[in-house]
Image (cartoon, rainbow, N blue to C red):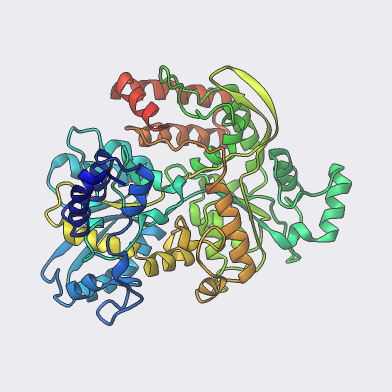
Amino acid sequence: MPNGGNVGKFEYLVHQYLKGRIGRRDFILGGLQLGLSFTVLAKLAGPARAANLMDSAPAAPYESPVTKERVDFLKTKPFKGTTINVMVLKATVGDGLKYHVPHWEEETGGKIKVAEVPIETLHQQIFSDLASGLGRYDAYMTGAWFYGDFFVPETPYIVEIDKFLSDPRYPNWDPNQWLPSMRKLYEWNGKLYGVLFDCDAQALYFRKDIFSDEKNKAKFKDKYGYALANPPKTTKELHDAAAFFTGWDWNGDGSADYGLALHAKVNEQGFFHFLSLSAPYVVSPDNKYYFFNPKDMKPLINSEGHLRALEDYVKLAADGPREEISWTLGQGWNLFLAGHSAMEPTWGDLPTLAQDPKTSKVQGKMGAAGIPGTTDAFNPITGEWKKYELNQVGNTNGGSWHCVISSNSKKQEATYDFLAFMANKKNAFFNAANGWTGVQPGMKFEYLPPVGSASIDEFKAQGWNADDVKEYLTGYYSVLSAPVQEEYLRIPGTAEYWHELDVNVSAVLGGQMQPKAALDATAAAWEKITDRYGRDKQKALYQASFA
C-alpha cells in the first residue's frame, strides 16, 4: 500500500477511476507513482462496476450480467436517433455480428448499418476509408494481422477503449477473463484497442470412433508396424494416419474416404494451415522466430526447416480431394462434417458446426488435440537442426476477427456500446457455443473447470454433445496455453507478406512451382515489402512484438 502521506492521493485516484473520470491505464500509472505494485493495481483495476452487477433486468433482456447504471442508462433509450456504420467480413463472423444488431437496437434505440465486404478486399477497403479521412464507418471488423497498419500514421487510425471500460453505463465485460495468448492480439503497445469477439487458433480434429475401431487399429499396425496413434502426436504419425485412411470406404457408405481435409484457396485464409503445420519444424524451445531474423529483418521463410515443412505439406495435401486447393473454408469443413474425412487441422468452427444434426454426421464422434509436433527442428538463426523428444507448438493462427473503433468516428460512444454488448458474457458465450457465428472461445468463462467457470450444462443448452464439449475445450486450450507458441505477425504490411506466401504455397500445391523456388520467391518479395515500409522501422516493431 502507499505510505501514510500518499493515502489521501490514492483514495482520490480510486474515486476518479470508479467515477469513470480516468481510464484503467491512468489508474495503474498513478498507482505505480504512489508505490503500489503492478500486480496489486491490475487486480484493483478490474471492471469498476463489478460490485453493482445483477444477473438480469427487464430493461436489458439480452445482457447478463448487467450493472444498475446500465439499466438506468437503457431506460432513457440513449442512442435513439443515432445510426452507426460497421464494416464486416462477409463470412460467418459477419453473420455472427449481424445476429446481435436487432437486440442492441431494441435495448438502446440506436440503429446499425452493416456493410459486408469479401475477405479479398476487406483490408483494402478498411484502409482506403481510413486514409481518406471521410469517416464513412464507425467501426471495422479486422483480422488481428491488420493491426500494424492501424499504427502507421503518427495519430493511430483507431482508438483505445480504456476510457469506455471504466464507465458502468456500458455493457459489462471483463478483459481479465481473456486467456493471455489471446489478449495480446487485441492490444498494441500494452493498450487495449479491440473489443472481444472471435478468438482463433488451429487444432487437430479427428474422428474418435474411427481411430478407436479395433479393425482399423489392427489393419494400421499390419501396414506400418506400430500402433495407430490416437490422436497423432508427431508429424510422422499424422502423415501415416492420413495416408492410411485415404482411398477406401472406412465409413461404410459405399464410397472411398479421405485421411485429411484442408481448404487452400488463395485469399481465403488457407495459408494459415501451412503456418500451423509448419511451426514445429522451425519454432522450438530454442527459437521463437518464424518470419524474420530480428537483427536485420532478413526473411527466414526459405530456411531448411520451412522447406522441409512445405515438402511434407504437399504430401499431406495428397490425402484429401484434389479439388481442395480451390476450396473455401466451408467446403473444407463440409468433407469432415459429412463423415468423409478422418482428420482436419483447422479452427474451432468445426466442432461447433458438428453439433448441428442438419448438416453434421459426426456429432458425438469428435476428438481434438494440439497440432502434431516434430522430433527435430531447424533453428534458422543458428542454422542448425536439433533433436527433441517432441517439439509441439501452440498457435493463435487465424483472424481472431473483432471490431475496432475508427478515430474518425463522431459516434464513438454508441459504437463502443454495441461492440461491448456483443462482448457481454451472455452474448459472448452464445457466440462461442454456436458454430454459425464463426466465433471461438478465448475467455475463461467459456472453458470448463479447473481452467474456467463454464459448465457442461451450459453447452448442452446450446445443443452440444457432452463428450464433444470436453474434447474440444481440452484440445483448444492445449493449443492456446502451450509453453512454446508460434509468433503472430502484426507489423505494418503483414497482409502483404502473407499474401505473397499464400500465392506461392498455392502454386506449389497446384504443381506450378517447386517448394524451394516458392519459398525463395516469397523471401525475395518480403525483402521488397520491408524496404518499402522502412527496414529500421519494421525491425523495431518486430522486436517489440516479442516484449
Q: Looking at the rendering, which quadrant does residue 98 occupy?
A: bottom left
Let me know if residue 514 appears in the view: no
Q: Residue furthest bottom?
A: 58
- The number of numbered discs placed on residues in the rendered structure image is 0
Answer with left or right where residue 513 lies relative to residue 34: right
The residue drawn where x is 52% and y is 52% is 347
Q: Residue furthest front?
A: 4
Answer with left or right where residue 364 lies relative to residue 118: right
Q: Position of residue 163 (x, y in %)?
A: 21, 52
Please say if 511 is above or below 381: below
Please say if 96 is above or below 7: below
Q: Looking at the rendering, which quadrant does residue 238 occupy?
A: top right
The residue drawn where x is 45% and y is 65% is 436
Q: Position of residue 8 (x, y in %)?
A: 18, 50
Q: Position of residue 99 (x, y in %)?
A: 34, 69
**Observer-nearest residue: 260 or 25?**
25
Q: In which quarter of the image is the C terminus?
A: top left
Q: Looking at the rendering, which quadrant does residue 225 occupy?
A: top right
Please say if 329 is above or below 287: below
Q: Residue furthest right?
A: 222
The residue drawn where x is 64% and y is 48% is 320
Let me know if residue 303 appears in the view: yes
Q: Position of residue 306 (x, y in %)?
A: 57, 28
**Observer-nearest residue: 89 or 173?**
173
